Amino acid sequence: MSNREIEVDNLVKRYSGDVLAVDGVSFAVEAGQIFGFLGPNGAGKSTTIKILTSLALPSSGRATVGGFDVVTQANQVRQIMGVALQDIGLDSLMKSMELLTLQGQLFGANKGQAQARAKELLELVGLTEAVDRRVGTYSGGMRRRLDLALALVHEPEILFLDEPTTGLDPASRRDLWQEVKRLNQSLGMTIFLTTQYLEEADELADVVAIINRGRIVTEGSPAMLKAAVGNESINLAFDDRSVAEAAAVQLAGLATSIQVDRAVVRLYMEQAAGSIPAVINRLQEADISPISLTLTQPTLDDVFLQATGQSLVGQETEPALAV
């Protein structure tokens, strides 16, 4: 019997050439949680999700999905999980009803049962009006919704979503968010989500873990992680990175910590609003002029930046300066 939990204990994955993709990762996902798994490209998140979905074997360590070991009980894992991976593999010549019916039959349903489930899912993901069209004519958003429907055919207890909204327009992304919330809240489904959109993790996840260079560098609820960054930040935009770096040097000592992200300097501090005059005066004395200044509350982008030294999408940044 599945317990809808995911447990990972000291997971390691080595590839040939002594490449360490996952380096002693441990975490637990409670039943009914939405767990956000974030990391820059090459951090190890895709390798981790492949191991959890029985698509790759770990070099060492142990992981269970729904109480089943991903190595020794892979068949049971596949029966109780649904997977929508980043790369959508849909036959463009088939129709949605055909694909969903076939998927249902592969999971043991007879044709009548599979067709009934297919109709239910097409209604669920809003594709009933496109049922007679070949999948090759679908938009990116429609293909994403069909891929989600395929992952739900056998009514899984645990759902893995690997960057499910990549390439979608904002409206389609919001629609998918609502469906993920519904699945979680109405069915109690445990959802393991990787995403390149920090606002998506903030919106959906109960717990977020950030992986960098194969290791978990921070973990907690979005609210807790943001609170740990500080109360407010002053963000100063400059013409280029070199000017931003010069400004960071001049502002050292005014903030709890300073981060340079491309051409933007972020100052983390208590009562940031009251410190704006001092910041401007210090820059004027150094003859440095920012393009813009904004005052913001901490976001998951700030958390990610401090934890990994880079933005989730973009080039690497300078390490935070201790001041």
Image (cartoon, helix red, strand yellow):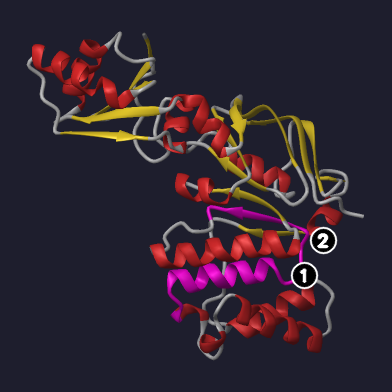
The residue positioned farthest toward the right in the image shown: 1
The residue stretch that appears in magenta: 137-163
Q: Residue at x 86, y 47 (%)?
A: 68
Question: Residue 91 at what x, y percent from top left?
Answer: 56, 75
The answer to whether mark 1 and mark 2 are in CB contact below 8 A is yes
Q: Residue at x 34, y 33 (%)?
A: 315
Residue count near mark 1 (Cα–Cα under 10 Å), binned few <14, some 14–19, many ≥20 = many
Quarter holding the N terminus is bottom right
State the image quarter where residue 289 is shown: top left
Q: CA distance from mark 1 to mark 2?
A: 8 Å
Q: Residue at x 14, y 28 (%)?
A: 290
In the image, residue 159 lies in the stretch drawn in magenta: yes
Looking at the image, residue 139 sits to the left or right of residue 98; the answer is left
Mark earlier in primary sequence (1, 2): 2
Using the rendered image of the protein, determine whether residue 140 is visible from the camera's viewpoint: yes
Q: Residue at x 46, y 56 (%)?
A: 166
* Residue 279, numbered circle: none
Using the rendered image of the protein, determine whether residue 266 is visible from the camera's viewpoint: no
Check disc 1 and report the residue beneath it.
Answer: 154
Check disc 2 and report the residue beneath it.
Answer: 79
Quarter holding the C terminus is top left
State the image quarter where residue 156 is shown: bottom right
Judged from the image, the secondary structure of the residue bearing numbered disc 1 is loop
Give amino acid for label 1. His
Q: From the viewer's side, name the closer residue of 211 and 229.
A: 229
